[in-house]
Structures are given as C-alpha cells and as structure tokens.
Image (cartoon, grey):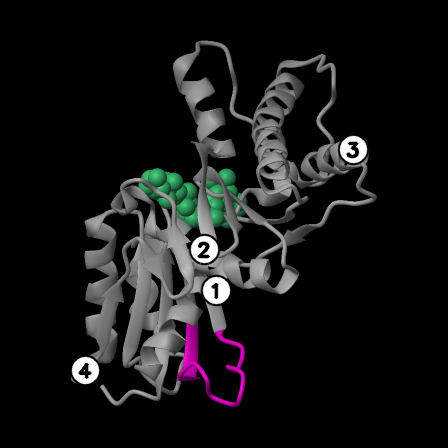
Amino acid sequence: MAKGSAAVLLIDAGNTRVKFAYYERLSAAGAEEAPAAPVRFILTHAEIEGLAAKLKQFATKPSLVIGVNVSGPLSAARIREQLDAHCGEQAYEIHWLASEPQLLHLRNAYAEYQQLGSDRWLAMLGLSVHEAAQKRPAMLISFGTATTIDTVFQDQFLGGLILPGLQLMSDSLVSGTAQLPAIQWATSSYPPAFPSSTAEALLSGITAAQVGAVLRQWLHVLKHCQQAPVVFYAGGAADYVLPELSRLLAEQAQLHGFDTIELLPFEDPALAGLLLYAQYYLAQ
Ligand SMILES: Nc1ncnc2c1ncn2[C@@H]1O[C@H](COP(=O)(O)OP(=O)(O)O)[C@@H](O)[C@H]1O
Ligand SMILES: CC(C)(COP(=O)(O)O)[C@@H](O)C(=O)NCCC(=O)O
C-alpha cells in the first residue's frame, strides 16, 4: 500500500457494540493539515452483517483498516467477511492491534502486557494526549459492558480497575435471585440515599457501586501523583451514572481543597488512540 495518505477505517469492537470511524483521506503524522472529521457509526454485533451495506455510503473503499477487538475471534471473522464483500477486488490491509509494553510514547505498567485489553490500551494512547496537554494525571472511566477505570501519568498507563458494567450488575441480580426485577435505566437522575422501593434500591445500589469505585481510584490517583487528575468518561452506559458521579466527585474535590473537578466526555477514546496509531503507521 502506498503510504502517506489512505482511506482508513478504524474499528473498536467491544463486547456489546462495534464502533467505527471512517476517514476518506487520512494523512501521515506530521502532515500540515489536521485530519477532516471522520464519519462515525456504531453497530451491535447482531447488526454486523449490515456493515458492507453501510460502507457503500462512502465514495471510496478503505485501503487500510486498523482495529481493536475484545469480543473474540468470531467477531473479527464476521467483520472481515463484510470488508471482503465490500472491497471486492480492491486490496486492503487489516491490522488488529494487541497490547504492547510500549506504543509510541506510552508505556504499559501491566506485568504481563498481553493481558491488557487492546481497547483499553489504545484508549490509553488516546488519553495520553490529554495528559500531555494538561500536564496532569488523566483518568478514563469507560462505562461499557464492563466498567474500567484507568489512569495515565507521565506517559505511563499506571493500571486500572475492571468491574461489571451497569447492565451486567443488573443482569447478575436478576439471574441470581428469585425476586429482583430488571432495572429501568433512566438518565439524569440522582438515585436516592435511602431507597424506599426495590426499583430505587437497585438503581441506588448499582450506581453507588460504580461511582464508589471511581471515587476510590480518584483518591488513589491523588495520593500517588500528588495532583488532582482530570477525569474523562466514555461508554454507552455513562449517562445513567453521570449526575451522581459528578455530584460525588465535586463534593470530594471540595473536601480536598479543590474548587472544582474536571469531568469531561471523551467520545470513543479507543478510536482516538487508533487515529494516532494510523497516522504514525502512514508515516513509516
Ligand atoms: N443503544 C444501546 N445499545 C446497547 N447498549 C447500550 C445502548 N445504550 C446504552 N447502552 C449501555 O451501554 C453499554 C455498552 O456500552 P459500549 O460503550 O457500547 O460497550 P462496549 O464497548 O463494551 O461494547 C451496555 O451495557 C448498556 O448498558
Ligand atoms: C475489560 C474489558 C472486558 C472491557 O471490555 P468492554 O467493556 O469495552 O467491552 C476488555 O478490555 C478485556 O477483555 N480486557 C482484558 C483484561 C484486561 O484488560 O486486563
């Protein structure tokens, strides 16, 4: 493939949904112009068989596909099938990235680097840009199928937490008990401190488990780095916990002498990391 610039498809295949970003023309790192905004779209795994049809909307076909996949080899094979159907005679390169001890400027603190989910690793690369810009530790909370709470400091992924995501917590209560119902998730609500119904008790319990884990890690980062981190959030379930997360972190920040806490959305951090990698790859 001629390097320098290419039509590039980036893929973040999570356990619930597959996120895509398509750049009709992406230039190598160091190019003067910033990349034009990509077209983004999301498919569930059940919708992957419509990927080839979805890609038909673009005037070009991708010549470079770079992705991360934590949803198993079958997902990768089904995506590949769709890309083959779409690209036909046109050759394309495809690379599924795995975690490494170091990628570009970012170091990985995992003892066995292969264990780290490739989506988390590339998300950390995306996050590292914010860490460098803000000159402060950066945390990323990804409220996906699983919830992950990860930190980058001084160009190193320090490590992070994995806990069941909101839906998994709810599902496990439903399947493991006789009486508990499924939760009806609602955005923009503060779950009550003293729930007086089963529905409220479940909502408050799960939300507290999620934001409590974030708070615990925020305190560890503060102690370890001697600086308040900037906190980013992502993932399909984020909106359900955001009000309580924001309230609790702001309260804790004040208790620790900070006026405010920065809690910022980060739209698909793994795709942001993949973009950096793709630009670097095109420059080789
Ligand atoms: N339209 C939706 N489809 C699927 N999950 C959704 C949707 N809206 C919110 N969610 C929530 O988002 C979670 C999946 O988030 P996502 O960031 O796509 O995860 P993953 O990266 O693990 O695939 C689900 O577990 C569910 O709680
Ligand atoms: C933690 C994860 C399940 C998160 O997946 P997601 O919720 O994004 O679908 C995934 O990154 C994974 O399988 N990781 C491997 C173990 C690790 O990162 O340590």
Instruction: Say whether disc 2 or disc 3 marks the residue closer to the N-terminus.
Output: 2
Where does label 2 land, which residue?
123
Instruction: Please identify the quadrant where the N terminus is shown.
Output: bottom left
- Please tell me in which quarter of the rendered image ligand 2 is found: top left
- State the predominant SS element of the stretch in magenta: loop
Q: How many discs appear?
A: 4
34 and 134: which one is in front?
134
Instruction: Say whether disc 3 or disc 4 marks the residue closer to the N-terminus.
Output: 4
Where does label 1 land, which residue?
272
Query: Toward which corner of the image does residue 115 lie, by quadrant?
Result: top left
Q: Give the residue type at disc 4.
A: Ala
- Please provide the residue range marked out in magenta: 22-38
Instruction: Report how far apart the C-alphas of labels 2 and 3 lie in the structure.
Output: 28 Å
Where does label 4 land, which residue?
91
> Is residue 263 rendered magenta in the image?
no
Percent coordinates x, y for residue 144 in the rendering: 47, 43
Q: Give the residue type at disc 3.
A: Glu
Disc 2, disc 1: CB below 8 Å? yes
Q: Is residue 20 visible?
A: yes
Comparing labels 4 and 2, the label whose residue is closer to the camera: 2
Instruction: Report how far apart the C-alphas of labels 3 and 4 lie in the structure.
Output: 55 Å
